[in-house]
Amino acid sequence: MSESEATIEMERGIAQIEASYREALESARDENELRRRNAQYVGAQGELTKLMKWMPKVPGDRKKDLGRRVNQLKQAIEALFSARLEAIEAEAMRAELEGPFLDVSLAGRGVRPGRLHPITRVEAELLDIFGALGFDVADGPLVDYHENCFDRLGFPPDHPATDMQDTFFVTRRQTGASATTLLRTHTSTIQIREMMRRKPPLAVVAPGTVFRRDDDATHSPMFYQLEGFLVDRDVSFADLKGVLTLFAKRLFHEDILVRFRPSYFPFVEPGGEVDISCVFCEAWTHDHERTAGCKVCKGTGWLEVLGCGMIHPVVFENVGYDPEEVTGFAFGMGLDRIAMLKYGIPNIKLLYENDVRFLSGF
Ligand code: PHE
Protein backbone atom coordinates (compact mmCIF):
# COMPACT_ATOMS: atom_id res chain seq x y z
CA MET A 1 0.00 0.00 0.00
CA SER A 2 1.60 3.23 -1.13
CA GLU A 3 1.38 6.63 0.55
CA SER A 4 -0.76 8.09 -2.19
CA GLU A 5 -3.19 5.13 -1.99
CA ALA A 6 -3.65 5.77 1.75
CA THR A 7 -4.40 9.39 1.02
CA ILE A 8 -6.92 8.45 -1.66
CA GLU A 9 -8.67 5.97 0.64
CA MET A 10 -9.01 8.61 3.32
CA GLU A 11 -10.27 11.26 0.91
CA ARG A 12 -12.82 8.84 -0.48
CA GLY A 13 -13.96 7.73 2.96
CA ILE A 14 -14.35 11.29 4.24
CA ALA A 15 -16.34 12.26 1.17
CA GLN A 16 -18.66 9.25 1.54
CA ILE A 17 -19.35 9.95 5.20
CA GLU A 18 -19.87 13.65 4.54
CA ALA A 19 -22.44 12.78 1.89
CA SER A 20 -24.45 10.32 4.01
CA TYR A 21 -24.39 11.10 7.72
CA ARG A 22 -26.87 13.98 7.73
CA GLU A 23 -29.59 12.02 5.99
CA ALA A 24 -28.87 8.91 8.13
CA LEU A 25 -29.22 10.70 11.47
CA GLU A 26 -32.11 12.90 10.43
CA SER A 27 -34.25 10.02 9.23
CA ALA A 28 -33.86 8.00 12.46
CA ARG A 29 -37.32 7.58 13.94
CA ASP A 30 -36.53 6.81 17.54
CA GLU A 31 -33.74 6.91 20.05
CA ASN A 32 -32.59 3.33 19.44
CA GLU A 33 -32.33 3.81 15.73
CA LEU A 34 -30.53 7.14 16.20
CA ARG A 35 -27.97 5.59 18.53
CA ARG A 36 -27.42 2.64 16.21
CA ARG A 37 -26.78 4.90 13.21
CA ASN A 38 -24.55 7.23 15.20
CA ALA A 39 -22.47 4.20 16.22
CA GLN A 40 -22.12 3.18 12.56
CA TYR A 41 -20.04 6.36 12.11
CA VAL A 42 -18.31 7.14 15.38
CA GLY A 43 -18.62 3.90 17.40
CA ALA A 44 -15.58 1.73 18.13
CA GLN A 45 -16.23 -0.18 14.87
CA GLY A 46 -17.69 2.85 13.07
CA GLU A 47 -16.68 3.97 9.58
CA LEU A 48 -14.99 7.17 10.71
CA THR A 49 -13.05 5.33 13.38
CA LYS A 50 -11.93 2.75 10.82
CA LEU A 51 -10.69 5.49 8.47
CA MET A 52 -8.11 6.49 11.05
CA LYS A 53 -6.20 3.28 10.45
CA TRP A 54 -4.88 4.79 7.20
CA MET A 55 -3.34 7.70 9.07
CA PRO A 56 0.14 6.20 9.68
CA LYS A 57 0.53 5.66 5.91
CA VAL A 58 -0.48 9.19 4.89
CA PRO A 59 2.51 11.34 3.77
CA GLY A 60 3.63 13.98 6.26
CA ASP A 61 2.47 17.00 4.29
CA ARG A 62 -1.13 15.65 4.05
CA LYS A 63 -1.45 14.34 7.63
CA LYS A 64 -2.40 17.64 9.20
CA ASP A 65 -5.12 18.47 6.71
CA LEU A 66 -6.73 15.00 6.70
CA GLY A 67 -6.56 14.75 10.49
CA ARG A 68 -8.32 18.07 10.86
CA ARG A 69 -11.07 17.09 8.41
CA VAL A 70 -11.71 13.81 10.22
CA ASN A 71 -12.00 15.73 13.51
CA GLN A 72 -14.35 18.30 12.07
CA LEU A 73 -16.50 15.59 10.61
CA LYS A 74 -16.59 13.81 13.95
CA GLN A 75 -17.66 17.01 15.72
CA ALA A 76 -20.34 17.64 13.14
CA ILE A 77 -21.74 14.14 13.57
CA GLU A 78 -21.72 14.47 17.36
CA ALA A 79 -23.47 17.84 17.22
CA LEU A 80 -26.13 16.54 14.87
CA PHE A 81 -26.59 13.45 17.05
CA SER A 82 -27.16 15.57 20.20
CA ALA A 83 -29.60 17.82 18.42
CA ARG A 84 -31.56 14.88 17.02
CA LEU A 85 -31.60 13.13 20.39
CA GLU A 86 -33.06 16.19 22.03
CA ALA A 87 -35.67 16.52 19.32
CA ILE A 88 -36.66 12.85 19.58
CA GLU A 89 -36.97 13.10 23.37
CA ALA A 90 -39.04 16.27 23.14
CA GLU A 91 -41.30 14.59 20.59
CA ALA A 92 -41.75 11.53 22.82
CA MET A 93 -42.66 13.76 25.76
CA ARG A 94 -45.15 15.74 23.68
CA ALA A 95 -46.76 12.53 22.39
CA GLU A 96 -47.12 11.24 25.96
CA LEU A 97 -48.66 14.48 27.22
CA GLU A 98 -51.06 14.75 24.32
CA GLY A 99 -51.83 11.06 24.16
CA PRO A 100 -54.57 9.18 26.00
CA PHE A 101 -54.78 9.73 29.75
CA LEU A 102 -53.04 7.04 31.82
CA ASP A 103 -55.31 6.05 34.69
CA VAL A 104 -52.92 5.29 37.54
CA SER A 105 -55.86 4.44 39.80
CA LEU A 106 -56.62 1.24 37.85
CA ALA A 107 -56.22 -1.90 39.96
CA GLY A 108 -52.77 -3.44 39.59
CA ARG A 109 -51.95 -7.03 38.83
CA GLY A 110 -52.53 -9.06 41.96
CA VAL A 111 -49.54 -10.45 43.85
CA ARG A 112 -50.39 -14.05 44.56
CA PRO A 113 -49.83 -14.77 48.23
CA GLY A 114 -47.61 -17.70 49.15
CA ARG A 115 -48.87 -20.62 51.20
CA LEU A 116 -47.46 -22.96 53.76
CA HIS A 117 -46.24 -26.26 52.35
CA PRO A 118 -48.58 -29.20 53.09
CA ILE A 119 -45.93 -30.84 55.26
CA THR A 120 -45.40 -27.62 57.22
CA ARG A 121 -49.15 -27.41 57.77
CA VAL A 122 -49.45 -31.00 58.92
CA GLU A 123 -46.48 -30.51 61.25
CA ALA A 124 -48.01 -27.36 62.74
CA GLU A 125 -51.34 -29.11 63.28
CA LEU A 126 -49.68 -32.06 64.97
CA LEU A 127 -47.64 -29.82 67.26
CA ASP A 128 -50.90 -28.09 68.20
CA ILE A 129 -52.67 -31.37 68.93
CA PHE A 130 -49.82 -32.85 70.97
CA GLY A 131 -48.98 -29.51 72.57
CA ALA A 132 -52.53 -29.34 73.90
CA LEU A 133 -51.96 -32.76 75.50
CA GLY A 134 -48.84 -31.45 77.27
CA PHE A 135 -46.10 -32.76 74.97
CA ASP A 136 -42.89 -30.70 74.67
CA VAL A 137 -41.14 -30.25 71.32
CA ALA A 138 -37.56 -31.46 70.82
CA ASP A 139 -35.07 -31.51 67.96
CA GLY A 140 -31.91 -33.44 67.14
CA PRO A 141 -29.08 -33.49 64.58
CA LEU A 142 -29.56 -34.94 61.10
CA VAL A 143 -26.18 -36.67 61.27
CA ASP A 144 -26.08 -38.85 64.37
CA TYR A 145 -24.07 -41.69 65.87
CA HIS A 146 -24.79 -45.30 65.00
CA GLU A 147 -25.37 -45.80 68.75
CA ASN A 148 -28.29 -43.31 68.87
CA CYS A 149 -29.88 -44.52 65.65
CA PHE A 150 -29.56 -48.27 66.25
CA ASP A 151 -27.60 -49.75 69.16
CA ARG A 152 -29.23 -47.99 72.12
CA LEU A 153 -32.62 -48.68 70.53
CA GLY A 154 -31.89 -52.38 70.77
CA PHE A 155 -31.17 -53.14 67.11
CA PRO A 156 -28.95 -56.23 66.91
CA PRO A 157 -25.68 -55.53 65.01
CA ASP A 158 -26.82 -57.51 61.95
CA HIS A 159 -30.30 -55.98 61.66
CA PRO A 160 -31.16 -55.28 58.00
CA ALA A 161 -31.98 -51.62 58.78
CA THR A 162 -28.28 -51.07 59.57
CA ASP A 163 -27.25 -52.27 56.08
CA MET A 164 -25.48 -50.10 53.53
CA GLN A 165 -28.61 -50.70 51.41
CA ASP A 166 -30.83 -48.79 53.81
CA THR A 167 -28.57 -46.21 55.38
CA PHE A 168 -26.46 -43.26 54.27
CA PHE A 169 -23.28 -43.63 56.29
CA VAL A 170 -21.09 -40.54 56.79
CA THR A 171 -18.11 -42.11 58.57
CA ARG A 172 -17.49 -45.77 59.41
CA ARG A 173 -15.40 -47.18 62.21
CA GLN A 174 -14.59 -50.16 59.95
CA THR A 175 -12.63 -47.79 57.69
CA GLY A 176 -10.64 -46.19 60.53
CA ALA A 177 -12.98 -43.35 61.60
CA SER A 178 -13.25 -42.69 65.35
CA ALA A 179 -17.05 -43.13 65.24
CA THR A 180 -19.68 -44.43 62.86
CA THR A 181 -22.02 -41.59 61.88
CA LEU A 182 -24.93 -41.53 59.48
CA LEU A 183 -27.90 -39.54 58.25
CA ARG A 184 -30.56 -40.59 60.78
CA THR A 185 -32.95 -43.17 59.36
CA HIS A 186 -35.71 -42.26 61.83
CA THR A 187 -36.48 -39.67 64.50
CA SER A 188 -36.19 -42.33 67.23
CA THR A 189 -32.65 -40.94 67.68
CA ILE A 190 -34.34 -38.05 69.49
CA GLN A 191 -35.98 -40.46 71.97
CA ILE A 192 -32.51 -41.62 72.96
CA ARG A 193 -31.02 -38.13 73.11
CA GLU A 194 -33.87 -36.63 75.14
CA MET A 195 -34.02 -39.53 77.57
CA MET A 196 -30.26 -39.36 78.15
CA ARG A 197 -30.56 -35.61 78.75
CA ARG A 198 -33.63 -35.55 80.99
CA LYS A 199 -35.20 -37.51 83.83
CA PRO A 200 -38.79 -38.80 83.72
CA PRO A 201 -41.59 -37.86 83.72
CA LEU A 202 -41.40 -36.55 80.18
CA ALA A 203 -43.65 -36.28 77.15
CA VAL A 204 -42.04 -35.15 73.92
CA VAL A 205 -42.81 -34.85 70.22
CA ALA A 206 -39.97 -34.40 67.73
CA PRO A 207 -40.56 -33.61 64.06
CA GLY A 208 -37.72 -33.75 61.54
CA THR A 209 -36.28 -35.06 58.31
CA VAL A 210 -34.95 -38.60 58.01
CA PHE A 211 -33.04 -40.38 55.26
CA ARG A 212 -33.20 -43.83 53.69
CA ARG A 213 -32.07 -45.38 50.44
CA ASP A 214 -35.64 -45.62 49.19
CA ASP A 215 -37.09 -44.05 46.07
CA ASP A 216 -40.49 -44.65 44.43
CA ALA A 217 -43.98 -43.10 44.20
CA THR A 218 -44.53 -43.37 47.95
CA HIS A 219 -40.91 -43.25 49.18
CA SER A 220 -38.36 -40.45 48.97
CA PRO A 221 -34.72 -40.69 50.13
CA MET A 222 -35.45 -37.70 52.39
CA PHE A 223 -38.77 -37.51 54.16
CA TYR A 224 -40.36 -36.23 57.37
CA GLN A 225 -41.25 -38.05 60.54
CA LEU A 226 -42.78 -37.08 63.83
CA GLU A 227 -41.67 -39.03 66.86
CA GLY A 228 -43.60 -39.00 70.11
CA PHE A 229 -42.88 -40.60 73.49
CA LEU A 230 -44.02 -40.41 77.06
CA VAL A 231 -42.31 -41.87 80.13
CA ASP A 232 -43.66 -41.88 83.67
CA ARG A 233 -44.70 -44.28 86.42
CA ASP A 234 -47.57 -46.62 85.52
CA VAL A 235 -47.92 -45.67 81.86
CA SER A 236 -49.93 -48.36 80.09
CA PHE A 237 -50.92 -49.39 76.59
CA ALA A 238 -54.32 -47.83 77.34
CA ASP A 239 -52.61 -44.42 77.58
CA LEU A 240 -50.98 -45.01 74.21
CA LYS A 241 -54.33 -45.97 72.66
CA GLY A 242 -56.02 -42.94 74.17
CA VAL A 243 -53.42 -40.48 72.91
CA LEU A 244 -53.26 -41.92 69.38
CA THR A 245 -57.04 -42.23 69.03
CA LEU A 246 -57.41 -38.60 70.02
CA PHE A 247 -54.71 -37.59 67.54
CA ALA A 248 -56.49 -39.39 64.67
CA LYS A 249 -59.85 -37.82 65.51
CA ARG A 250 -58.43 -34.32 65.80
CA LEU A 251 -56.32 -34.53 62.66
CA PHE A 252 -58.69 -36.36 60.31
CA HIS A 253 -62.28 -36.74 61.43
CA GLU A 254 -64.20 -36.95 64.70
CA ASP A 255 -65.87 -40.25 63.67
CA ILE A 256 -62.71 -41.93 62.44
CA LEU A 257 -62.04 -45.48 63.62
CA VAL A 258 -58.62 -46.55 64.81
CA ARG A 259 -57.23 -50.07 64.97
CA PHE A 260 -54.06 -51.38 66.56
CA ARG A 261 -52.25 -54.34 64.94
CA PRO A 262 -49.29 -56.16 66.51
CA SER A 263 -46.00 -55.45 64.78
CA TYR A 264 -42.29 -55.54 65.52
CA PHE A 265 -39.77 -52.79 66.22
CA PRO A 266 -36.68 -53.65 68.31
CA PHE A 267 -37.24 -50.73 70.69
CA VAL A 268 -40.83 -51.47 71.75
CA GLU A 269 -42.58 -54.40 73.42
CA PRO A 270 -45.37 -54.93 72.66
CA GLY A 271 -45.11 -53.12 69.35
CA GLY A 272 -47.88 -52.23 66.98
CA GLU A 273 -49.00 -50.44 63.91
CA VAL A 274 -51.98 -48.14 63.81
CA ASP A 275 -54.51 -48.07 61.00
CA ILE A 276 -57.18 -45.43 60.60
CA SER A 277 -60.38 -45.98 58.69
CA CYS A 278 -59.92 -44.77 55.13
CA VAL A 279 -60.35 -41.00 54.77
CA PHE A 280 -61.09 -41.24 51.03
CA CYS A 281 -64.10 -43.56 51.10
CA GLU A 282 -64.90 -42.38 54.65
CA ALA A 283 -65.01 -45.98 55.77
CA TRP A 284 -66.44 -44.98 59.17
CA THR A 285 -69.77 -44.37 57.43
CA HIS A 286 -69.92 -48.11 56.58
CA ASP A 287 -70.89 -47.42 52.99
CA HIS A 288 -69.59 -50.82 51.89
CA GLU A 289 -70.05 -50.22 48.20
CA ARG A 290 -67.98 -47.06 48.29
CA THR A 291 -65.24 -48.74 50.28
CA ALA A 292 -65.22 -51.75 47.94
CA GLY A 293 -64.41 -49.43 45.03
CA CYS A 294 -61.82 -47.30 46.88
CA LYS A 295 -58.41 -47.32 45.20
CA VAL A 296 -56.62 -45.76 48.17
CA CYS A 297 -57.47 -48.38 50.80
CA LYS A 298 -57.94 -51.04 48.09
CA GLY A 299 -61.34 -51.96 49.48
CA THR A 300 -60.04 -52.79 52.95
CA GLY A 301 -61.37 -49.62 54.62
CA TRP A 302 -58.07 -49.18 56.49
CA LEU A 303 -54.93 -47.10 56.02
CA GLU A 304 -51.71 -47.67 57.93
CA VAL A 305 -50.41 -44.46 59.51
CA LEU A 306 -47.82 -45.14 62.18
CA GLY A 307 -45.71 -47.47 64.28
CA CYS A 308 -45.88 -47.52 68.07
CA GLY A 309 -45.47 -49.55 71.23
CA MET A 310 -44.39 -49.65 74.85
CA ILE A 311 -40.75 -48.61 75.21
CA HIS A 312 -38.57 -51.71 75.65
CA PRO A 313 -36.90 -52.16 79.08
CA VAL A 314 -33.52 -52.53 77.31
CA VAL A 315 -33.91 -48.99 75.90
CA PHE A 316 -34.55 -47.66 79.41
CA GLU A 317 -31.42 -49.44 80.65
CA ASN A 318 -29.39 -48.01 77.77
CA VAL A 319 -30.36 -44.43 78.68
CA GLY A 320 -29.93 -44.89 82.43
CA TYR A 321 -33.60 -45.23 83.47
CA ASP A 322 -34.79 -48.01 85.83
CA PRO A 323 -37.29 -50.19 83.92
CA GLU A 324 -38.67 -51.41 87.27
CA GLU A 325 -39.68 -47.85 88.07
CA VAL A 326 -40.88 -46.31 84.83
CA THR A 327 -42.82 -47.35 81.77
CA GLY A 328 -43.60 -45.43 78.64
CA PHE A 329 -44.83 -45.50 75.10
CA ALA A 330 -43.44 -44.26 71.78
CA PHE A 331 -44.81 -43.72 68.30
CA GLY A 332 -43.44 -42.57 64.97
CA MET A 333 -45.32 -41.40 61.89
CA GLY A 334 -44.37 -40.22 58.41
CA LEU A 335 -45.48 -36.64 57.91
CA ASP A 336 -45.33 -37.03 54.12
CA ARG A 337 -47.71 -39.95 54.33
CA ILE A 338 -50.06 -38.09 56.67
CA ALA A 339 -50.03 -35.05 54.34
CA MET A 340 -50.66 -37.30 51.32
CA LEU A 341 -53.65 -38.91 53.06
CA LYS A 342 -55.02 -35.66 54.42
CA TYR A 343 -54.80 -33.78 51.12
CA GLY A 344 -55.16 -36.67 48.66
CA ILE A 345 -51.68 -36.28 47.15
CA PRO A 346 -50.97 -39.25 44.87
CA ASN A 347 -47.16 -39.05 44.59
CA ILE A 348 -44.64 -38.12 47.27
CA LYS A 349 -42.40 -36.41 44.68
CA LEU A 350 -44.99 -33.65 44.26
CA LEU A 351 -44.10 -32.51 47.77
CA TYR A 352 -40.50 -31.78 46.75
CA GLU A 353 -40.80 -30.32 43.23
CA ASN A 354 -41.62 -26.77 44.36
CA ASP A 355 -44.18 -26.40 41.59
CA VAL A 356 -46.43 -23.47 42.56
CA ARG A 357 -49.33 -24.98 40.61
CA PHE A 358 -49.24 -27.88 43.04
CA LEU A 359 -48.44 -25.81 46.13
CA SER A 360 -51.26 -23.34 45.54
CA GLY A 361 -53.82 -26.16 45.31
CA PHE A 362 -54.27 -26.56 49.06
N1 PHE B 1 -38.87 -45.46 64.21
C1 PHE B 1 -39.86 -46.28 63.59
C2 PHE B 1 -39.69 -46.20 62.07
O1 PHE B 1 -39.06 -45.30 61.60
C3 PHE B 1 -41.25 -45.86 63.96
C4 PHE B 1 -41.55 -46.10 65.41
C5 PHE B 1 -41.31 -45.11 66.35
C6 PHE B 1 -42.09 -47.31 65.82
C7 PHE B 1 -41.60 -45.33 67.68
C8 PHE B 1 -42.37 -47.54 67.15
C9 PHE B 1 -42.13 -46.54 68.06
O2 PHE B 1 -40.20 -47.03 61.35
Image (tube, helix red, strand yellow):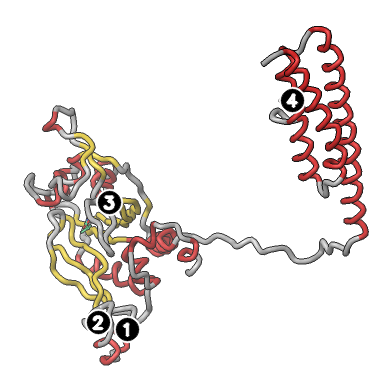
First in sequence: mark 3 or mark 4?
4
Q: Residue 49 bears which disc, if any?
A: 4
Distance from disc 3 to disc 4, alpha carbons, whole Å, reads: 72 Å
Judging by the rendered image, the residue that carries numbered circle 3 is 187
Above or below — where is 112 with respect to 94?
Answer: below
Q: Secondary structure at mark 4?
A: helix
Q: Secondary structure at mark 2?
A: loop
First in sequence: mark 3 or mark 1?
3
Q: Which quarter of the figure has residue 44?
A: top right
Whether ligand 1 has any atom under 8 Å from the Cβ at mark 4 is answered as no
Whether ligand 1 has any atom under 8 Å from the Cβ at mark 3 is answered as yes
Judging by the rendered image, the residue that carries numbered circle 2 is 301
On the picture, is 332 further left or further right than 268? Answer: right
Q: Identify the residue at image location x=75%, y=34%.
A: 39
On the picture, is 338 further left or further right than 303? Answer: right
Q: Identify the residue at image location x=24%, y=88%.
A: 292
Q: Position of residue 308 (x, y in %)?
A: 21, 62
Front-most of residues 222 and 195: 222
Distance from disc 1 to disc 2, alpha carbons, whole Å, reads: 8 Å
Looking at the image, can residue 247 be seen? no
Marks 2 and 4: which is nearer the front? 4
Front-most of residues 51 and 291: 51
Q: Secondary structure at mark 3?
A: loop
Q: Are marks 3 and 4 in contact (CB under 8 Å)?
A: no
Extreme-top residue of the structure: 60
Whether ligand 1 has any atom under 8 Å from the Cβ at mark 1 is answered as no
Front-most of residues 355 and 213: 355
Above or below — where is 97 with respect to 81?
Answer: below
Circle 3 packing at 10 Å, graded few (<14), some (14-19), many (20+), is many
Q: Residue 156 bears which disc, if any?
A: none
